[in-house]
Every structure is written in structure tokens, then in C-alpha cells.
Amino acid sequence: MRNDTDVFFEMPCLTEKSAVVGGAATAKKWFANSDPRNLSHYLQKFLVYNAVALRFLEVDAAIVGTDSTAGLSFRSSSFVGAVPLRSPATGKQIGDFVVSPRFVGRHRFGEYIEILDLVGSDISPEFQDSQPLASGRIFRPPFYLEAVKFISALEAMLQIPWRKFDTLDEISDSPVGLVDWNEYARNQHKVENIVRYPTRRNVLSELHHQFGEIRFVFDLCRDELQSNTTPPRIRNLFRSRLSVIEKRLYLHKPRRVKQIQIRAADRLVLKVCKHQANRVLDQDLSEGTAWRVDFNDVFEKFVQYVLRKVAQSIGGTLFPNPHILARTNQRFAWELSRVEPDAILKKGDWTIAVEAKYKSHLFNKYDAGDVLREDYRRDLHQLLAYAAFGEKPEKLGLLCYPSNFIEIKSSRFEINLSRGSANVLLVGFPLNRALVPEIVGEMSEIISRRFGRND
């Protein structure tokens, strides 16, 4: 069971300003003989002492209030994870700082697993050496996160023939294979051993021990994906797929292993499967430690997936992460050799630049703070720079942020010095697999009207 002392503070990612953690209660609990009239001093020491841990999660902390009313407020980024915190006075652990996914139902990662399976992307936790989490395994990355990726890798591996040579030591009635002549000489004085040759042969087989090791990892993942700790939607999503794999591996007996050897001669799809199997084995045996997951890449891949469907519906083409090369005779050390938009949607001589940013703007529409404004300014400038490579005077761009529901807002940028203009669609993408058809439909209609008006 979870204890309240296990968690110092928990907040969702993409939070601009969290609830205030009371400085008086914090100082009383973790700073012996602290002066309640000067809480800011103790809170500052606390933040400095735990700066590395908070920086790992990209969490910004601020002291709000003064003197006896001082407290702590936090701002989170796109990272989700947990780190242990310690008291600067005693060095003892005071609980974990936890950043949870923004869209939280009963299961923290359920929605994201569905997205990852949909787009075929990867999301791997990054760990940091630290003392064990006070919450133990409660706030670890869920085991089914790695199990889902292993099942996908195993499905790809089963599409190719994988045969290996098994080495067999046996007694043969003829000298075939690699004969151990020393052993034969020691025993051939007996008449019955004259035609008994100790040999070693390599036999091509699909029932080799490495497949048994893969079967062992599959059994771990199957049990996890069928357990009550896995969200029902994930269980339903993988039920038939697990059944198909189990039939394919029926003849292979599981062989317990702590690490699967990856050989240089293995095919790429096999190396990927073995690598993910080792990740499953490592996480199954490891204790809770500081970890984080960055959902920037997940959101980018999800937007690309949706826009690829949009491009198909309007007769266009989506180019994910195209390279825009910089041609120059001499490149300074700080210059870039290329830039890379998240995507370019092209139809005929029309192009739309796309930038996907996993930021909190659409959750804080009426926050006039400088941080959101400056972040938006940088995102907009970046998008307009990519849109400038379009062939027509009117430039088009999509700036995509996560949101709770589908929303599309249009802005037109004009300048009196030329006839050029730019239209930017600010698009809110809910990270929800069930809403993908609706998002595709609305985006297709809006973009078709834009293309149709100017074709």
C-alpha cells in the first residue's frame, strides 16, 4: 500500500503553475528547530540541495510568498517520471517528486500505450543512478510499457525465417562430422566400440535454445499484459495478438535467462527483438530508481500519423522530418548544416509546414505570463521560417499543441511592404486513439477548402 510519506509532491506534466506546497509544514517536518519567520531561507536550501533531481525531470521551482507565508510552486515540462528527494538538514530521504501523464484516468499510461501501438513509435524510460524511490515500484514505469514494445518486436521477428545450428554430441556408427579421435582411441580396444565414433555435428533447427529464451520473455510479457494491473483496453487490444504468437511458439519450451546474447551476425529485426527482450528482463529485476520519459517524440509521431491520413484523404503527400540543407562555402562552428521541420504536407505546388510541440498552451489559454508568450513566439517564428520555403506567395503552416478536445484556430499574418502573407492554423490534438477519425475528418475538410480556394 502507498504511504503518504512516500510522495513529497505529485503533479501532471505540462503544468505552468502547481498548487503551492506550504513552507511551514515542510520546514517543520524536515528542518529541525527552523525559524517559522524565515521560511524562504530553508526552502531555498531545499531547492539548491535537490536541484539535480528536479533538473532531471525538467521541473522549475519557485518560492512564492515571503517570511512566514512562503511556499513552493512548481512548473513541469514534457517529462513524466519520479525522483527521490532528500532533506538538506539530515540528508535523509523525504519522499519522491512525481510528474504524472497529463491525461490520467485509472491507469496512468493506458492512453499512451494505445497511441504508441497505433503509430509504431518507441517510448523508453531513461533511468538515473540514485537511491531507491521511497514509493518503491508504485511509481515505476509500468512493466506493460516494455511488454507492449516486446510483443511488437516479436511479431516483426516471427515474419522472417530464423534457423540456427544446434551442436549435437552423439555416438555415430560412421565417422561423420567432427570425430573426437582421442576419445575413440581410448575406447576402441573394446570390440563393441570399433564402430562407435564420438562425433559432434551441427544440425540446422528452429527448436534451438535461443528461441527458448525468447519464449521465456514472451511468457513474462503475456502474463503482464493479461494481469489485472494492465488497463482493460490494453488487454483487449493484445488478446488476439498474444494468442497468435502463443500458437507460433507452442513447440518451444521456455528457457530461463537473465540476459539474451545479441550476436553481430543476427539480422537487424532479430537484434531489435533481443534488445527489447533484455529491456524487459532488466526492468523485471530492477528496483525502483529515478526515471523519466519524454513525450515530445510521442506527440510528434502521433501528429505525423494523423496528418498522413489527412494527406491520403485529400490526395496529397506527407513528408515527415524532411531535411532543409544549408549550402555554404565556409561553415562556422556554431552554424547548422541543416534544419528539420516535423513534417511538410504537399499537394501540387502547395506546401504546408508542420510543427508539433508538446506544450501546455491550450491548457492555459488565458494565462498572460511571459513564459507562454515567449515559447509561442519561438514556435511561431520557427514555423514561419519553414513555411517560407513554399512556392506560392501565401504561406501555410500548422502549429500543433496537445489539448483536451479537437480545436482549430486560424490566424493570418500580413505585411504592408509586400504581397506576401502567411496563414497559420493553431490545432489542438487530443491524445486519444478513439478521436483519430474525427480529427482526420475535420483537418481534411479545412485543408481541402484551403487548397480548393487557391487551386
Image (spheres, grey):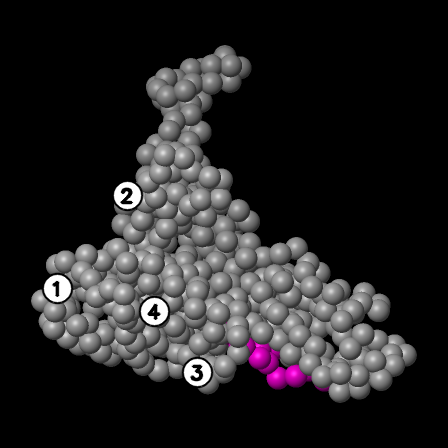
Q: Earlier in the sequence, mark 4 or mark 1?
A: 1
The correct choice, above or below, for 206 with respect to 33 in the image is: above
Q: Which mark is residue 161?
A: 2
> Looking at the image, which residue is at 52% across and 66% down?
79
Q: Nearer the viewer, mark 3 or mark 1?
A: 3
Label 1 sits on a secondary structure element that is loop
Residue that carries the numbered disc 3 in the rendered image: 365
Amino acid marked by disc 4: Leu
Estimate the spatial distance between the alpha carbons at disc 1 and disc 2, rounded to whole Å: 37 Å
Q: Which mark is residue 315?
A: 1
Estimate the spatial distance between the alpha carbons at disc 3 and disc 1, rounded to whole Å: 34 Å
> Looking at the image, which residue is at 30% across and 71% down?
413
Q: Earlier in the sequence, mark 3 or mark 1?
A: 1
Estimate the spatial distance between the alpha carbons at disc 2 and disc 3, rounded to whole Å: 54 Å
The stretch of residues the image draws in magenta is 9-22
Near mark 1 (Cα within 10 A), the count class, few <14, some 14-19 or many ≥20, is few
Q: Is residue 19 magenta?
A: yes
* Quadrant position of residue 123: bottom left
Estimate the spatial distance between the alpha carbons at disc 4 and disc 3, rounded to whole Å: 15 Å
Residue that carries the numbered disc 4 in the rendered image: 399
**Residue 21 spot, x, y in % from top left:** 68, 82
Amino acid marked by disc 3: Lys
Q: Is residue 155 left or right of residue 229?
A: left
Q: Nearer the viewer, mark 1 or mark 2?
A: 1
> Looking at the image, which residue is at 20% across and 76% down?
446
Label 4 sits on a secondary structure element that is strand
Q: Is residue 72 left or right of residue 161?
A: right
Near mark 3 (Cα within 10 A), the count class, few <14, some 14-19 or many ≥20, is few
Amino acid marked by disc 2: Pro
